[in-house]
């Protein structure tokens, strides 16, 4: 039995209690059905739950103050390992719309999403729905699965933006034009961001354009902007890297004379620090070039608390680290 299955009885029990006390029943009359038409939100705001703060930021860009948004995972939270709390289950049960990444990013919440769908709470796996399979990167670890980290390719995030706007518009039809107009404006900003990342990446000579990070989350960045990417762990952080993984990556870094390694805000730095020490033992010195935003954005109210700010921070940090520029 997998981890999600072992924990599901706790989630089911919490949900059953909520149903008995009327947490979901009280909202059923105003909640849109999974496949039905949009509801009337003139008396109150649409209740939207986003799993990651990446998706939460996207909802803010499109819907702003017109929705009541709850984001389950804040800065520094690893969605691969996240388990829904009783409070999370309650918020989702009372939501009009649940938006999650999909592609197994929130792997330990799969049963919760399935239960919400059975309860006719509208849900959307936004990356799974928006990005065609032909543009997804297959997982080297899990057969028939794909890498879920699509946001590292800004062009793919524009597809997610359009999809989220469409879901919001179909759920809250009275504001459909507003959501779609805001999405068009945001896509223009993302187009500019995409050009910026491309230009910055090209500042680094191709032999040096190698990104070594805590886990293999940056493949879409590498494909979109011609950066070679190596991660210590696989696309999921649920399995830890072993001594052989550390030594293999250290040999690669030492042989290629990679100038910098990078840690992530949502992953422990211990693995990369072990690689750094292993490289030193091989007679080459490599520094930690900075911290990247991987599976989560930064704090609200900071530039890195938005998708645009985090992407700019990441590419600037990578380029400075690889070119040995001062911070």
Image (tube, rainbow, N blue to C red):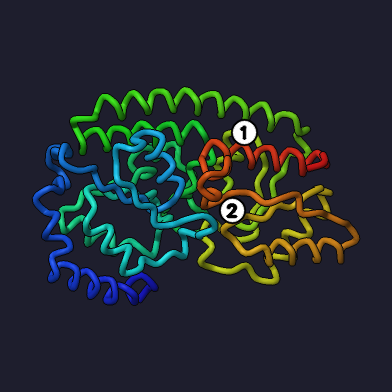
Question: Between residues 69 and 324, which one lies in front from this camera angle?
Answer: 69
Q: Is residue 10 left or right of residue 171?
A: right
User: Residue 223 location, x and y as percent?
Assistant: 58, 37
Q: Is residue 82 above or below residue 172?
A: below
Question: Residue extending furthest left?
Answer: 29
Q: Is residue 132 above or below residue 6?
A: above
User: Residue 256 location, x and y as percent?
Assistant: 81, 48
Question: Between residues 106 and 61, which one lies in front from this camera angle?
Answer: 61
Which residue is at 30% across, 46% downward? 68
Question: Which mark is first along the chain, 2 or 1?
Answer: 2
| Secondary element at image label 1 | helix
Q: Is residue 102 left or right of residue 214?
A: left
Question: Between residues 146 and 63, which one lies in front from this camera angle?
Answer: 63
User: Residue 217 location, x and y as percent?
Assistant: 56, 51
Question: Residue extending furthest right?
Answer: 283
Which residue is at 43% across, 52% downward? 52
Residue 225, label in figure: 1
- Cα–Cα span, label 1 and label 2: 16 Å
Q: The N terminus is located in which quarter?
A: bottom left
Q: The C terminus is located in which quarter?
A: top right
Label 1 crowd (10 A; few <14 / some 14-19 / many >=20) = many
Question: Between residues 251 and 10, which one lies in front from this camera angle?
Answer: 10
Say if mark 1 contacts mark 2, CB within 8 Å.
no
Residue 216, label in figure: 2
Is residue 1 visible in the rendered structure shown here? yes
Which residue is at 57% across, 34% downward? 224
Label 2 crowd (10 A; few <14 / some 14-19 / many >=20) = many
Q: Is residue 125 above or below residue 276?
A: above
């Amino acid at each position: 039995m997998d981890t999600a299955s072992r924990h599901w009885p706790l989630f089911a029990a919490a949900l059953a209690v909520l149903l008995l006390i009327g947490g979901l029943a009280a909202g059923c009359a105003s909640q849109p059905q999974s496949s039905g038409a949009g509801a009337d939100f003139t008396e109150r705001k649409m209740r939207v739950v986003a799993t990651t703060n990446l998706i939460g930021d996207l909802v803010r860009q499109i819907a702003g103050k017109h929705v009541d948004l709850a984001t389950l995972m804040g800065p520094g939270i690893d969605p691969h390992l996240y388990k829904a709390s009783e409070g999370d289950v309650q918020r989702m049960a009372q939501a009009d719309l649940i938006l999650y990444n999909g592609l197994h990013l929130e792997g330990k919440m799969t049963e919760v999403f399935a239960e919400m769908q059975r309860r006719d709470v509208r849900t959307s796996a936004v990356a799974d729905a928006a990005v065609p399979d032909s543009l997804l990167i297959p997982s080297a670890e899990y057969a028939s699965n794909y890498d879920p980290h699509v946001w590292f390719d800004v062009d793919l995030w524009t597809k997610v933006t359009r999809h989220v706007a469409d879901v919001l518009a179909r759920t809250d039809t009275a504001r459909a034009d507003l959501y779609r107009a805001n999405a068009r404006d945001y896509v223009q900003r993302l187009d500019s961001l995409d050009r910026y990342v491309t230009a910055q990446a090209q500042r680094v000579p191709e032999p040096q354009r190698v990104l070594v990070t805590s886990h293999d989350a940056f493949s879409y960045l590498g494909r979109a902007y011609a950066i070679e990417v190596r991660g210590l762990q696989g696309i999921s952080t649920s399995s830890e890297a072993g001594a052989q993984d550390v030594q293999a990556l250290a040999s690669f870094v030492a042989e290629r004379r990679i100038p910098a390694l990078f840690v992530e805000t949502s992953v422990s730095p211990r693995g990369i620090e072990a690689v750094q020490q292993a490289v030193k033992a091989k007679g080459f010195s490599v520094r930690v070039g900075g911290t990247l935003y991987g599976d989560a954005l930064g704090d609200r109210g900071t530039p890195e608390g938005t998708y645009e700010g985090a992407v700019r921070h990441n590419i600037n940090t990578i380029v400075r680290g690889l070119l040995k520029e001062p911070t």
